[in-house]
Image (tube, rainbow, N blue to C red):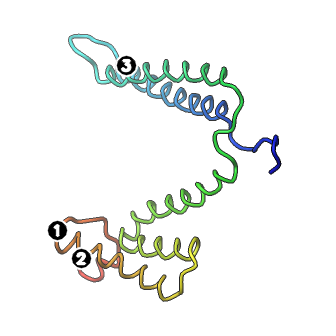
Amino acid sequence: MQQGEFERGLSYRAAECGWALIVAFFSGLALWDSFERGAGWSGGPQSGFFPAQMAGILLVASIFIFFQGLRRPPGVLVTWLQLRRVAQVLIPLTFYILAIEYVGVYVASAFFIAGFMVAFGSFRWWAVLLSGLLIPLVTFWVFELQFKVPLPKGPLEAWLGY
């Protein structure tokens, strides 16, 4: 990149205004739901009273942040390349968390660790295989057998009797 040339990416203004709109949307949903449940005070707080108060505060704050974002001078918060790197971690992490529900934390961790080692490192195949197997096994030994802390298990652990 040459001097004087601006980097391209997500601007502060877009990030603040976009996030404020998202928070305002969910605040509006929470307010609507709270008033459906009853957000008044008749002989004491109704079930939607406290959520309505919190949603109202969030809505006011999001409106303030939105207009503050509009006044912000132009500038790049994060470049597209940086966002791509974050997505390279965030998307597999999301699948890992979803996989825990179906295959358990140990099997999901084995694939997650091995996948990251293959994708982002220049490790030998046996190091990937050993790390993918040994780290979940040590974790299982520590949490399940030593500390007696049950973590989410899947069909493999059930097949092995745990």
What is the CA distance from the residue labelled 1 to the residue labelled 3? 41 Å
Residue shown at 70%/34% (left/top)?
Answer: 75
Which residue is farthest top? Answer: 42
Which residue, given by chain and number where applicable, does mark 3 sit on?
53
Rendered position, 17 above or below 153: above
Residue 148 is tagged as: 1
- Of labels 2 and 1, earlier in sequence is 2
Amino acid at pointer 3: Gln
Q: Nearer the viewer, mark 2 or mark 3?
A: 2
Q: Position of residue 88 (x, y in %)?
A: 59, 60
Judge whether 86 appears above or below 110 on screen. above
The residue sitting at the bottom extreme is 126
* Element marked by disc 3: helix
Q: Nearer the viewer, residue 136 or 127?
A: 127
Give the residue at x 56% y 28%. 20
The reply to whether dot 2 and dot 1 touch (C-beta < 8 Å) is no
Reading the image, the residue beneath label 2 is 141
Tell me which corner region of the image, top left, top right, bottom left or bottom right, holds residue 133.
bottom left
The amino acid type, in three-letter code, at marker 1 is Lys
Please give the name of the residue rendered at 35% of the width and 75% of the height, measured from the top-left corner.
136
Mark 2, secondary structure of its residue: helix
